[in-house]
Image (tube, rainbow, N blue to C red):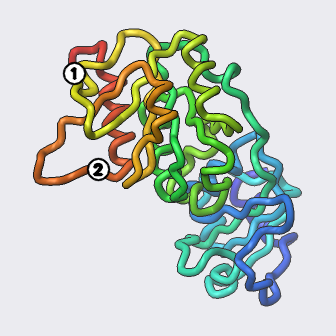
Amino acid sequence: MAKADRKRALRGRAGRMKGGRGSGRASPGQVRLWGRHPVEAALKNPERQHRKLWATREAIESLDGELPPDFPVEYADVQDLARLVARDAPHQGLVLECAALEDCYLDTVATGDPDAPVVVLDQVTDPHNVGAILRSAAAFGAACIVTQDRHAPPESGVVAKSASGALETVPWVRVVNLARALDELAEAGYWRIGMAGEADATLAEAMPKGAMAIVLGAEGEGLRQNIASHCDALARLPISSAIESLNVSNAAAISLYAAATRNKGDA
């Protein structure tokens, strides 16, 4: 079936949204994503189990690729869709409800590749920051991000929107004990660098040539003492004294760039 014909057939089968629930929350056990890049990435991810897509006709036409013929789609206008997402969220005419991604484990994704650093986040709880860090991790080829389950945001539309599709491609490892995870990384051959503004060494001076883990703390508090003590080195970014610190997602992006270029003479 031609693409245009398939879309017409799909539109013919789709229902018309009747008002919407207005809660902005997903069904139990589901995650609600919105925006073109997060929704497209989720639709292309074979690991996702999809429940339903609400969309405007224009947004469906703009999607990259084709939906399966039996995909559950319900058409809606912009005002209806706004009631399905967080307040003032830029849904761009697409709202997808799907199951959360399956858990992944550190020993399956942290393989010791020196070109794929691991990013460890110590109590970074802002979903916008975590999403932005996922996006940088995808851009610079990180192996995964690691967070402590109790002190990190859940998978959500806000994280996915900030990640701009990277939620579907970068493994997100959630652990019970972050210090123990750092021990496991050391056993796997990773050099663990804790980012701390008070450190004497710069990141360029502290980086090894082999596998490395970049450990970042929450804004304001920084790394907890116990987490810093589980790092092999502490390092700082050489920023101007005119500013006290960088946003954690900016620091992550710069650190990942430095890691990506360290053996190429560009850093």
Q: Where is residue 186 in the image (x, y as percent from the top left)?
A: 55, 15
The residue identified by callout 1 is 266
Question: What amino acid type is highlighted by mark number 2?
Answer: Leu
Label annotation for residue 246: 2
Which quarter of the picture shows residue 67?
Answer: bottom right
- Give the SS element for disc 2: loop
Residue at 30% across / 19% down in the picture? 206
Q: Where is residue 228 in the image (x, y as percent from the top left)?
A: 44, 31
Q: Is residue 115 above or below residue 257?
A: above
Question: Closer to the observer: label 1 or label 2?
Answer: 2
Residue at 45% across / 16% down in the picture? 191
Mark positioned earlier in the residue sequence (1 or 2): 2
Please identify the quadrant where the C terminus is shown: top left
Residue at 71% across / 38% down in the picture? 176
Which quarter of the picture shows residue 3?
Answer: bottom right
Q: Specify whether residue 223 is in view.
A: yes
Q: Nearer the viewer, residue 226 or 53?
A: 226
Label annotation for residue 111: none
Q: In this view, does 118 lie above or below 95?
A: above
Q: Nearer the viewer, residue 126 or 100?
A: 126
**Crowd tier of the residue under label 2, counting other residues whose Cα lies within 10 Å: few below 14, some 14–19, many 20 or above:** few
